[in-house]
Image (spheres, helix red, strand yellow):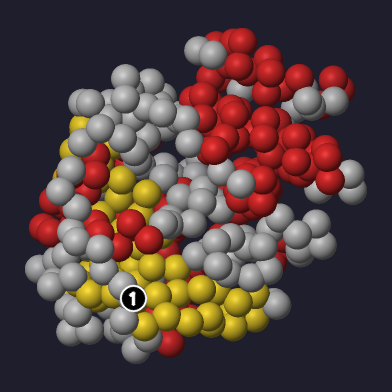
């Protein structure tokens, strides 16, 4: 995959977004280029410095930021005292608008991956006048059936690993909402229980994230703090239905039907089966859906397709 050369931010900082939260942001590329914002996955999986290399620095003014509770934003969700009641989808949407205003951007391209797709779609549906177009990879839409698939139904595909995942949950809670059960474990006063819950959650994510032959587990290599941030935020959002009405994204897609969009999804993405991307594409005929036959959730040649899609969108 031919990424652009490494590039350093030309501006960065922390924006006070209220509720005790400070959000880290950075811009790179050309200040006169097409503005674009990148929405990372998770929730709680902040971008790496390599994320900048997907964007042509000669064409884009790229904004990358760490969503509330993760990465370089503060406070971190791994802090047992962190108040997650002010970390919701509505809060993240409000943060996006604060960042856009803070940087003096009128309209921008919205790009994202996985959870960032759901966040980007909701933002665009609420603020279509601020969006030039969308580039979305590993499509999700925040539906309950998507999280049900990941936490329970996929146990039929990976039964041994799912038993290990569920074994930590108190027996009385194993037939209920597993995201909520894990959220309770991750909020336990005992740090050893919190750490083990984060490890188990990351082990399960590494198991199901892809069936692609080149897939290698990554989350179990992260630091304990990273794992706890990630697991706590994912379970917090999923236990609350992503803080969205079920099917909200598809029900409101008519609000963005006029906007250009490129959807990219991996054929081997067992974590997020292709039907979510297909349903969105059918509801949004103007969108262009690219199915990457050698890719999982974000692997194979999906990065190349993402770069090509971003280059296509740069001229909007």
Residue 235 placed where, x, y %? 66, 43
Given residues 139 and 305, the one toward you in this image is: 305
Query: Quadrant location of residue 38?
Result: bottom left
For residue 239, side relative to residue 148 (left or right):
right
Picture quarter with the N terminus: top left
Position of 123 relative to 200 (above/below) = below
- The quadrant in which residue 261 appears is bottom left
Label 1 residue SS: loop
Q: Which residue is mark 1?
A: 9
Judge left or right: residue 293 versus residue 239: left
Q: Dividing the image into 4 quarters, which one contains the C terminus? A: bottom left
Instruction: Provide residue 98's location: percent of width, then percent of height.
Output: 48, 81
Q: Is residue 198 above or below residue 127?
A: above
Can residue 121 be seen at all in this image of the molecule?
Answer: no
Task: Tell me what residue is drawn at x 28 percent, y 26 percent.
Answer: 267
Q: Residues within 10 Å of mark 1 (few under 14, many from 20)?
A: some
Q: Is residue 16 visible?
A: yes
- Residue 26 is situated, as x and y percent measured from the top left of the image, at 40, 75
The residue positioned 43% from the left and 87% from the top of the image is 102
Q: Name the residue nearer the viewer: 156 or 40.
A: 40
Residue 24: give x, y in percent of width and height.
51, 73
Residue at (18, 59) in percent of width and height: 4
In the rendered image, the residue lying farthest to the right is: 189
Q: Is 246 situated left or right of 140 in this image?
A: right
């Amino acid at each position: 995959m031919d990424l652009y050369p490494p590039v350093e931010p030309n501006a960065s900082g922390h924006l006070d977004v209220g509720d005790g939260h400070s959000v880290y942001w950075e811009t790179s590329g050309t200040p006169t280029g097409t503005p674009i914002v990148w929405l990372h996955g998770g929730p709680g999986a902040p971008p790496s410095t390599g994320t900048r290399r997907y964007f042509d620095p000669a064409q884009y003014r790229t904004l990358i930021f760490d969503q509330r509770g993760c990465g370089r934003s503060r406070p971190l969700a791994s802090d047992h005292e962190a108040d997650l009641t002010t970390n919701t989808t509505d809060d993240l949407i409000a943060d996006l608008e604060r960042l856009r205003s803070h940087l003096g951007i009128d309209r921008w391209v919205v790009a994202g991956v996985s959870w960032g797709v759901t966040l980007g779609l909701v933002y665009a549906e609420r603020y279509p006048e601020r969006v030039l177009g969308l580039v979305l990879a590993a499509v999700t839409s925040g539906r309950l059936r998507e999280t049900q698939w990941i936490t329970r139904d996929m146990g039929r595909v990976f039964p041994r690993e799912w038993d290990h995942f569920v074994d930590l949950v108190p027996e009385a809670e194993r037939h209920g909402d597993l995201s909520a059960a894990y959220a309770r474990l991750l909020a336990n006063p005992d740090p050893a229980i919190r750490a083990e819950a984060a490890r188990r959650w990351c082990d399960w994510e590494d198991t199901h994230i892809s069936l692609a032959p080149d897939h290698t587990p990554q989350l179990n290599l992260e630091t304990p703090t990273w794992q706890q941030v990630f697991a706590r935020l994912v379970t917090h959002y999923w236990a609350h239905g992503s803080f969205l009405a079920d099917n909200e994204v598809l029900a409101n897609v008519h609000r963005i039907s006029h906007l250009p969009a490129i959807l990219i999804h991996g054929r081997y993405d067992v974590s997020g089966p292709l039907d979510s991307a297909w349903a969105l594409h059918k509801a949004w005929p103007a969108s262009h859906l690219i199915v990457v036959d050698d890719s999982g959730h974000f692997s194979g040649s999906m990065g190349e397709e993402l770069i090509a899609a971003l280059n296509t969108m740069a001229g909007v």
